[in-house]
Image (cartoon, helix red, strand yellow):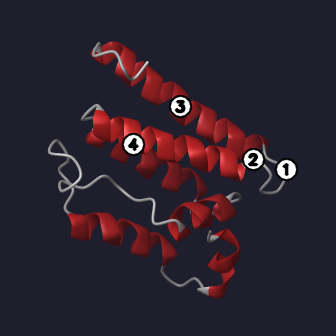
Amino acid sequence: MLARRDVDLVEKAITQMEERIVQLVNDSVRDQLYPKALECLIALRLGCIQEEEADLFNSVLRRLRGLFDGKKRNDFWLMVSSRDLTLIHNQESDDSSVSPSEAKAFLSQSLSGLDGPSLDKFKK
């Protein structure tokens, strides 16, 4: 769907992917489905860069952080953070309003106060 330039279809595809990511995380027994959810998030990020929809992706990532960071499925957010999967910044996409430093700060804010060793199991 992302290959078509119809804005309504692109937004619909992004919304559906966000819903699927949330479903995978919430339906996961422990972290069983987290890798699949992470793959979806990575694919969504790449697609949004290609389609110049950085702000939509950034909104999705902010919502996901709000759903999972410091909450029941915090371990999924730790996995996202450990992979440096952050906001799309303006050096990656011209349509982004986020600077590289803001993108980096986005992850460091969510990781503040957490031990580094707890992230080791999520690193490749």
Instruction: Looking at the image, tell me whether mark 3 or mark 2 is earlier in sequence order.
Output: 3
Outermost residue, right direction? 29
In the rendered structure, are the residues bearing label 3 and label 2 in contact, judged by CB atoms less than 8 Å apart?
Answer: no
Which mark, residue 29?
Answer: 1
Q: Is residue 85 left or right of residue 25?
A: left
Do the CB atoms of the residues marked 4 and 3 lie less than 8 Å apart? no
Instruction: Specify the quadrant that holds the N terminus.
Output: top left
Res. 17 mark? 3
Provide the secondary structure element on which disc 2 rests. Answer: loop
10, above or below 73, in the image: above
* Amino acid type of the residue tagged 1 in the rendering: Val
**Quarter of the rendering containing residue 19:** top right
Give the mark, 4 or 1, whose residue is nearer the N terminus: 1
Taking depth in this image into account, of 5 and 19 the one nearest to the observer is 5
* Residues at marks 4 and 2, CA–CA distance in whole angstroms: 20 Å
Q: Which residue is mark 2?
A: 33
**Amino acid type indicated by mark 3:** Met
**Quarter of the image where one finds residue 120:** bottom right
C-alpha gap between disc 4 and disc 3? 13 Å
Q: Is residue 55 above or below residue 2?
A: below
Mark 3: secondary structure: helix
Q: Amino acid at mark 2?
A: Leu
Q: Are marks 1 and 2 in contact (CB under 8 Å)?
A: yes
- Which residue appears at 18% of the width and 56% of the height? 91
For label 4, the crowd category at 10 Å Cα-Cα, with few meaning under 14, some 14 to 19 and many 20 or more, is: some
